[in-house]
């Protein structure tokens, strides 16, 4: 995406609290959330991880072509997570959403 100008992507940063150990949640993320996200219209990038200061907090950054595709994808992910409260006990919260200004690859 380095050659794309700003304004052509939309980013959502979401957090999920109350997660168990990564060994228990990682397979579900890989089997359920990643494939669901990848198949959403307008998908560009997905980054996930754990908050080093608070390991029970998961963070996901997703990039889509525009706001509507990002919002729709987030709704799909949240609905899937709601069906599996044993893995994701709390609904994800969007912490930051907005237009990508600069994208660069190292």
Image (cartoon, helix red, strand yellow):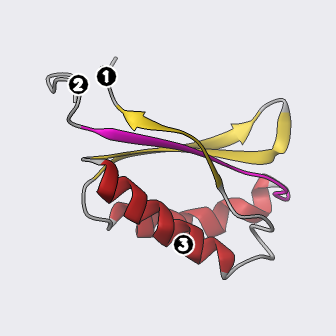
Determine crowd level at label 3: few under 14, some 14-19, many 20+ residues with C-alpha closer than 10 A: some
Query: Which quarter of the figure is the C terminus placed in?
Result: top left
Give the CA distance from mark 3 to mark 1. Answer: 30 Å
Stretch of the chain drawn in magenta = 9-20
Q: Nearer the viewer, mark 2 or mark 3?
A: 2
Q: Nearer the viewer, mark 3 or mark 1?
A: 1
Q: Position of residue 33 (x, y in %)?
A: 53, 66
Is residue 80 toward the left or the right of residue 9 in the image? Answer: right
Task: Give the residue drawn at x 24%, y 47%.
Answer: 65
Task: Give the residue drawn at x 25%, y 56%.
Answer: 42
The secondary element bearing badge 3 is classed as helix
Mark 2 touches mark 1? (CB < 8 Å):
yes
Q: Position of residue 26 (x, y in %)?
A: 67, 59
The residue indicated by pointer 2 is: 6
The secondary element bearing badge 1 is classed as loop
N-term mark: 2 or 1: 2
Q: Is residue 31 visible?
A: no
Q: Position of residue 9 (x, y in %)?
A: 27, 38
Is residue 41 toward the left or the right of residue 27 in the image? Answer: left
The residue indicated by pointer 1 is: 101
Determine crowd level at label 2: few under 14, some 14-19, many 20+ residues with C-alpha closer than 10 A: some
Could you say which disc has been placed on residue 32 in the image?
Answer: 3
Could you say which disc has been placed on residue 89 in the image?
Answer: none
N-term mark: 3 or 1: 3
Task: Give the residue drawn at x 54%, y 72%.
Answer: 32
In this view, the residue in front, 76 or 36, is 76
Task: Give the residue drawn at x 17%, y 23%.
Answer: 5
Query: Which quarter of the figure is the N terminus placed in?
Result: top left
Q: Residue 27 colored magenta?
A: no
Query: Where on the picture, by quarter, is residue 37?
Result: bottom left
């Amino acid at each position: 995406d380095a050659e794309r100008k700003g304004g052509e992507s939309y980013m959502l940063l979401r957090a999920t609290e109350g997660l168990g150990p990564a060994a228990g949640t990682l397979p579900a993320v890989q089997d359920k959330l990643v494939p669901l996200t990848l198949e959403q219209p307008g998908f560009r990038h997905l980054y996930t991880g754990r908050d080093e200061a608070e390991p029970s907090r998961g963070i996901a950054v997703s990039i889509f072509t525009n706001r509507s595709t990002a919002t729709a994808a987030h709704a799909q992910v949240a609905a899937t997570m709601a069906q599996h409260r044993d893995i994701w006990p709390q609904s994800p919260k969007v912490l930051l959403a907005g237009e990508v200004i600069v994208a660069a690859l190292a």
